[in-house]
C-alpha cells in the first residue's frame, strides 16, 4: 500500500486497553500459551479500544462460566449480554443441529417456517401492537434499519438521542450514540440532524439536582431531563424520532414517569419513539422488555444480543403496523435476513427463557442481590450508589461517601481482584462495576459473586487508603 495514503493515526498504537494494572495482572496470570494466543490475536486483528489487544484467551464457555487457556474459570457477569440462557444450552444446540439438517439456509425471496415462527413469537411477547418485523445479523444493523424506517415513515430525518448512550458501530448508530470513543475524532462527519440531550442519570444528575434518600427528588427536579427532550422536539419541530435505551446499560434506571413524559412529548410533536433493547430485551431487567416496567409502548423496538442464544448473531426490529410503508424500498435486505438456523436459535432461546422462568429469576434474584448490595454499601463508604433492575446492576465506586469523586483506579483494582478470584464483569463510566449475570444464575452463584465483590472492595480500598 502507498504509505502516503495513510494519514497520521489517531492513537493507533496507544493500546488504551493495556493499563499498568492490566499489564501487572497479565504478568501474574498469563502463561506462554495465553501470551501466544493474545499476541497472535493482536498481530492479526485491527487494534481497537476495548477489544484487541485482549485480556486473556478463552477455550470454553458453558452455562454461566467461561474458562481460559490456563484452566482458570470465571463466573461471567458480563457476557456482552448475550448469555441470558447460559453458554451452550444443550436444548439450543440440539435445535440448531436439527435445523441444520432440515433446512440450513433460505434465500431471502423464499419464506421459511422458522423465520415466520420467530417473527410471530416476537410479536406475541413484545409490548402493545408491535407487529411488523425485520431481522438483521447484529444490533448495529438493526439500529440502522430502525433509523431508516423512522425517516421514511415520518418524512423527517432528525433524531434526538442521549449523550453517553451506545447504539452500535454503524454510521447511523455512531451518530446517535453519545460516547466520544465511537463518534469523535477519527471517523469524520456523522449524520446531520442527530441532536443529543443529557440523559437521565439521577445519582449524577446532569442538571445538578440532588437525590433524596438515594432516589430522584421529583418535587425538586420536575423531570427536567424529560422536559429537555420536549423542549428540543418543540424547537426543532421536525424530529423523526427519539431513540434511547429504556434502561441505560451503564446502568441507570429511568426516574418514575420519565418515559410517559417522553411518550407524550413524541406524540405531541409527531416524533416516533424508538427503544433500543439490544442488551436489556428478553428478560435482563426482570421483565421481558425493560420498557414493560414503565408501561410505555415504543413505535419501534430493537433487540439483539441474547436473541441468538449466545451462539448465533441475530437481531430484530419490531414496528407498529402503520410504519409498514416502504414496500417499494429495501431497508434491511441482509443476506441472512431469514436464515432458518438463526431463526430457530431465536425461537428456541425464547422458549427456553419462558420454560425455565428465567425472567422471573432475574426479577427475584436481582431484587435480592440489589438488597444485599445496599447492605454492603452501608459497610463500605467507597460505594456511592447501587442501582439497577433485575440482572442489570451497577455498583458505583467513589473516593468517599462525603463527595462523589469517581474512584476509577479503585474500580479497576477491584475488577482485577475479582478476576483473580473467578468473577468476570466490566466497569462502565470508569468507576461503576457493572454486573449483567446470565438469567440462569442461581442463588449460590449470586452469593459467591457478591462476596467476591465485597472482599475485593475491602482489600482494594484498604490498599489505597480509602476505608
Ligand atoms: C444499547 C446497545 N445498542 C446497540 C448495540 C450494538 O449491537 P451489536 O454489537 O450487536 O452491533 C449494543 C452493543 O453492545 C448495545 O449495548
Image (cartoon, rainbow, N blue to C red):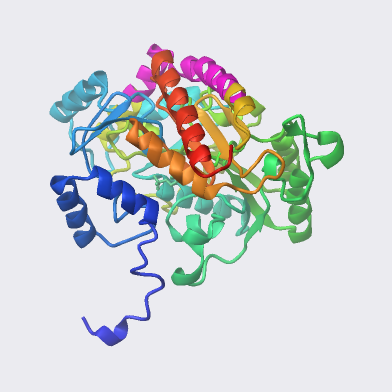
Query: Where residue 276 sits: x, y (%)?
Result: 53, 41
Q: Which residues are magenta?
A: 348-374
Residue sitting at 79 percent across and 53 percent down? 231
Q: Quadrant of the C terminus?
A: top right
Residue 308 vs residue 154, the one in the foreground: 308
Residue at the extreme right of the image, as rendered: 219
Along the line of sight, the residue nearer the viewer: 75 or 173 = 75
Q: Is residue 63 above or below residue 407?
A: above
The answer to whether residue 27 of the structure is visible from this angle is yes
User: Can residue 333 be found in the magenta stretch?
Assistant: no
Q: How many marks?
A: 0
Residue 25 or 41: which is nearer the viewer?
Answer: 25
Q: Position of residue 223 (x, y in %)?
A: 79, 41
Q: Main secondary structure of the magenta part?
A: helix
Q: Quadrant of residue 424?
A: top left
| Residue 219 position in % (x across, y down) | 86, 35
Quadrant in which the N terminus is drawn: bottom left
Q: State left or right for residue 376 relative to residue 402.
A: left
Residue 318 visible in the displayed image: no
**Residue 371 on the magenta segment:** yes
- For this view, does 384 lie left or right of residue 205? left
Rendering coords of residue 16 (x, y %): 39, 60
User: Residue at horizontal 28%, vertical 34%?
Assistant: 342
Q: Residue at x 61, y 56 (%)?
A: 155
Amino acid at each position: 500500500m502507498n504509505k502516503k495514503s495513510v494519514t497520521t493515526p489517531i492513537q493507533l498504537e496507544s493500546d488504551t486497553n493495556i493499563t499498568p494494572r492490566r499489564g501487572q495482572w497479565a504478568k501474574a496470570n498469563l502463561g506462554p500459551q495465553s501470551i501466544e494466543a493474545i499476541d497472535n490475536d493482536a498481530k492479526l486483528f485491527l487494534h481497537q479500544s476495548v477489544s484487541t489487544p485482549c485480556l486473556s484467551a478463552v477455550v470454553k464457555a458453558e452455562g454461566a462460566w467461561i474458562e481460559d487457556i490456563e484452566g482458570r474459570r470465571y463466573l461471567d457477569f458480563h457476557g456482552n449480554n448475550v448469555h441470558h440462557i447460559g453458554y451452550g444450552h444443550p436444548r439450543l444446540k440440539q435445535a440448531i443441529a436439527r435445523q441444520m439438517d432440515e433446512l440450513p439456509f433460505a434465500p431471502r425471496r423464499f419464506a421459511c417456517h422458522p423465520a415466520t415462527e420467530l417473527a410471530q413469537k416476537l410479536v406475541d411477547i413484545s409490548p402493545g401492537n408491535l407487529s411488523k418485523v425485520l431481522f438483521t445479523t447484529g444490533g448495529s444493523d438493526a439500529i440502522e434499519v430502525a433509523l431508516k424506517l423512522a425517516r421514511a415513515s415520518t418524512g423527517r430525518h432528525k433524531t434526538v438521542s442521549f449523550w453517553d448512550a451506545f447504539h452500535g458501530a454503524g454510521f447511523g448508530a455512531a451518530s446517535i450514540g453519545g460516547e466520544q470513543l465511537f463518534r469523535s475524532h477519527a471517523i469524520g462527519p456523522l449524520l446531520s440532524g442527530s441532536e443529543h440531550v443529557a440523559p437521565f442519570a439521577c445519582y449524577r444528575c446532569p442538571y445538578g439536582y440532588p437525590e433524596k434518600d438515594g432516589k430522584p427528588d421529583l418535587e425538586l427536579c420536575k423531570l427536567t431531563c424529560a422536559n429537555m427532550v420536549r423542549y428540543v422536539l418543540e424547537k426543532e419541530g421536525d424530529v423523526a424520532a427519539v431513540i434511547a435505551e429504556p434502561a441505560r446499560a451503564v446502568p441507570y434506571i429511568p426516574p418514575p414517569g420519565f418515559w410517559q413524559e417522553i411518550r407524550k412529548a413524541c406524540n405531541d410533536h409527531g416524533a416516533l419513539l424508538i427503544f433500543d433493547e439490544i442488551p436489556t430485551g428478553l428478560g435482563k431487567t426482570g421483565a421481558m422488555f425493560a420498557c414493560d416496567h414503565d408501561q410505555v409502548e415504543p413505535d419501534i423496538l430493537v433487540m439483539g444480543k441474547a436473541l441468538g442464544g449466545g451462539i448465533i448473531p441475530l437481531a430484530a426490529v419490531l414496528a407498529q403496523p402503520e410504519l409498514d410503508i416502504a414496500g417499494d424500498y429495501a431497508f434491511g435486505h441482509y443476506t441472512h435476513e431469514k436464515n432458518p438456523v438463526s431463526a430457530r436459535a431465536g425461537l428456541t432461546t425464547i422458549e427456553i427463557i419462558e420454560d425455565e422462568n428465567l425472567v422471573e429469576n432475574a426479577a427475584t434474584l436481582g431484587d435480592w442481590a440489589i438488597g444485599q448490595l445496599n447492605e454492603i454499601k452501608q459497610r463500605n463508604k467507597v460505594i456511592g450508589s447501587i442501582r439497577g433492575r433485575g440482572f442489570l446492576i451497577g455498583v458505583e465506586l467513589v473516593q468517599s461517601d462525603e463527595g462523589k469523586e469517581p474512584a476509577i483506579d479503585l474500580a479497576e483494582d477491584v475488577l482485577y481482584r475479582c478476576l483473580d478470584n473467578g468473577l468476570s464483569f466490566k466497569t462502565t463510566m470508569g468507576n461503576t462495576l457493572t454486573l449483567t449475570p446470565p438469567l440462569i444464575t442461581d442463588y449460590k452463584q449470586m452469593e459467591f459473586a457478591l462476596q467476591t465483590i465485597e472482599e475485593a472492595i475491602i482489600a482494594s480500598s484498604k490498599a489505597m487508603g480509602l476505608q
